[in-house]
Image (cartoon, rainbow, N blue to C red):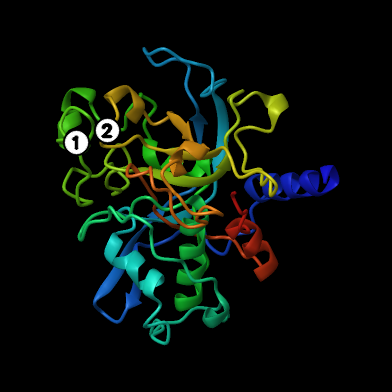
Amino acid sequence: MFLYKLILSLFFLLMMIHPSVVNTHLENYEETVLGDQKTIKMRAIAPGNYAMGSMGEGFQNKGVQSPQHEVYVDAFWMSEKEISWEIYQEFLYREKDHIRADDYGDLVLEIDGLSAATMPYVNFNVTNHPVIDVTQYAASMFCKWLSAKTGRFYRLPTEAEWEYACRAGTTAPYSFDPNLIDEYTWYADNSQGTFHPSGLKKPNSFGLYDMHGNVAEWVLDHYDPKGYDAASDSGHFFLRMESLYPRVFRGGSWRDPKEALRSSERNYSSPKLKQRDPQLPKSLWWHTDAPHIGFRVVRSNKILNLDEMNLYWGKPIQEY
């Protein structure tokens, strides 16, 4: 197991340091999910270096965001908004899998063989809002399904990619003037105790909406309480297949104070997210107690084979 983990760790680290890319100059586009009725707007994110993490930024720093360290991020695309309930329902119901994108890409993946999500035990999702209560595994399987429908490789972002996109070239605690916070985000002081449709607030300079607040967002990484200590493998995507908890989600949400919305802020999953799930085993797909967590997708600019893609999508880990 140790050797397996070491190989995976080195693989993902090398992919970050020495990426194999098709093109570093990307263009925005719309991904077709279902004819011309449902699309996902994808924003092109240019490559670059940035200081990941926090040096305190005027708030109490618990150490999980430090030490601040420089990270290189390759070019990628990120969805302009959090994935909506309407889009996620297409994956949930699987009634129109036969409809593929007109400009189908190069990835050949049999869609009929993909795992189908179960219906939620309790559904708090709302039309025209981001999908919520999904597990990280469910979000990753949506990415795999979207990849099969479009022929393009979609996945969740790494922590490094997510923070890079959230900061949008800034180095302050937020990607906006904190005096204008109500113009950019839904959080505890203005959300009226609930989440809202994506895109009602102003985007950051990369054109991404709700990176701060509204619903928090799953990323690929496991959470390490040691922060970014070089001795702990933190700060890089390190896949531990045998560990379900804790997984990282980012961005803060509608129920959090403004301090939890900082670009560097990290949060993590625990079994409490399923404490009201009466099923045995508990659902692979739904967190009954996570009405504040959703996700957005990225499209990689790297050339990968299917085995490598599956490492990013991951495997189910049953919870009893």
- Secondary element at image label 2: loop
Residue beneath the point at 45% across and 46% down:
218
The quarter of the displayed image where residue 311 is located: bottom right
Q: Residues within 10 Å of mark 1 (few under 14, many from 20)?
A: few
Above/below status of 253 relative to 14: above
Task: Identify the residue at horizontal 51%, vertical 75% (top origin).
Answer: 148
Between the C-alphas of marks 1 and 2, the distance is 6 Å
Q: Mark 2: which amino acid?
A: Arg
User: In x, y percent, where is residue 21?
Assistant: 59, 60
Number of numbered markers: 2
Sequence-wise, the earlier of marks 1 and 2 is 1
Number of the label disc, if any, that sits on residue 255: 2
Mark 1 is on which residue type? Gly
Seen at 38% across and 62% down, the residue is: 27
At 32% from the left and 45% from the top, the residue drawn is 291
Q: Are marks 1 and 2 in contact (CB under 8 Å)?
A: yes
Q: Position of residue 203 (x, y in %)?
A: 24, 45
Please state if 161 lies on the left or on the right of 292 as rendered. Answer: right
Residue 102 lies in quadrant: bottom left
- Which mark is drawn over residue 193? 1
